[in-house]
Image (spheres, helix red, strand yellow):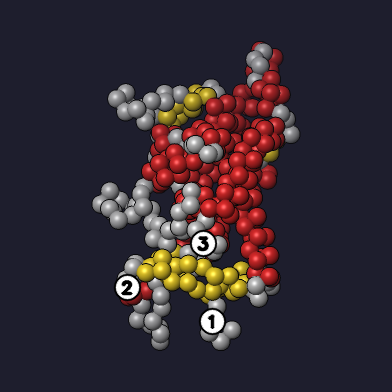
Amino acid sequence: MLFKDILNKKTCELQPEFDLLFDDILKNQTHNGDLLLIRVNGFYNPEVHTWTNLSEKLSPYMIGPNKEGHSDYLHYEFIHNYRTTGIVALNHSDYLKQHEWSQEREKEIDEIVDHESMTIQLEMLVYLKIWEADFFIKKLYQLTRLCLGEAYDWHFRISESNRDKEATGTREKIIRKLVRDRLEKRYPKIYQAIKNAYRTQIRNSIAHSKYSFLSRNIHPNNFIKNDPASQIKSLTFDEWIEMFHDTMVIYNLIIRLFNQVDKLYEKVAFENDLLMEVRVSRIDPEERIEFYLLKYRPEWKDWHWKRIDE
């Protein structure tokens, strides 16, 4: 369940720092097209070198949704349905009063807890669809780089196994070390929200279905005495509510930020004959910097590589 009072409180706390993040990116990005590259999803795809059904050779440096973008759209539909239909009318404090036990209300309270339990299991799926999603993690990573004055990373890749040494990192490492910890000094509230929302032990217990419910408590079945990262024995439903609302507010504010990006670059496009230069930092076939033009299509509100005949 989503509580409007908690959403509003957390949004008021985090939105100013997301606005600061957006302003810092505009000031600090090392090329004016880098933020647009996050929006159009610039990526490196060496598989093009194996394609034999094309009449011309393609560059492995591409823009477009790719597999992670199509996946993101599917997950967005699911998450958006929940974030718009899962809001309850009661404030959280009023909701808790419904759990105040009395013998006369025993059956009613049991039904409320049962409903809450089912809802939390649905929220756990939403939680994974956010924190495990390649596209969401990539956007967080690239935004962090740009606000710190680093170039867009065309070669970002999430590790899929322990043997993958050339990837940017595992999901956990990217979220905790390459995003959260790097944002701490300048954006302490965003840092704290990510720290509270993304807990690897809870993520693992959900992903592997290693948890149980007892009354209004979640018991992850992956407590490990000697592992500092696996020390949670129990999580109350109200602690979950805090975690999940932090997750949803971060998700909502990332959407809001990219709505700002769309408006910004649409304005730039109309001021520059629908064109915008972007930088490609290549390593294939050799290390070098190249610059290309993207063209905006107002009727579709999207961008594509400018062709020679345009």
For residue 127, side relative to residue 167 (left or right): right
Of label 3 and label 1, which has the lower sequence position? 3
Query: Looking at the image, which residue sits at the far left?
Result: 163
The label on residue 71 is none
Q: Give the residue type at disc 2.
A: Pro
Of label 2 and label 3, which has the lower sequence position? 3
Is the C-beta separation of discs 1 and 2 under 8 Å? Answer: no
For residue 11, side relative to residue 135 (left or right): right
In the picture of the structure, the residue carrying the numbered disc 3 is 31
- Image coordinates of residue 189 in percent, x first then y, are 56, 35
- Image coordinates of residue 32 in percent, x first then y, are 55, 62
Q: Give the residue type at disc 1.
A: Arg
| Label 1 crowd (10 A; few <14 / some 14-19 / many >=20) | few
Residue at 64% across, 40% down? 16
Is the C-beta separation of discs 3 and 1 under 8 Å? Answer: no
In the picture of the structure, the residue carrying the numbered disc 1 is 307
Question: SS for tag 1?
Answer: loop
Question: SS for tag 2?
Answer: loop
The label on residue 285 is 2
| Label 2 crowd (10 A; few <14 / some 14-19 / many >=20) | few
Query: Looking at the image, which residue sits at the far top?
Result: 103
For residue 179, side relative to residue 91 (left or right): left
Residue at 53% across, 84% down? 308
Looking at the image, is mark 2 or mark 3 nearer the viewer?
3
- Image coordinates of residue 261 in percent, x first then y, are 62, 57
Q: Quadrant of the C terminus?
A: bottom right
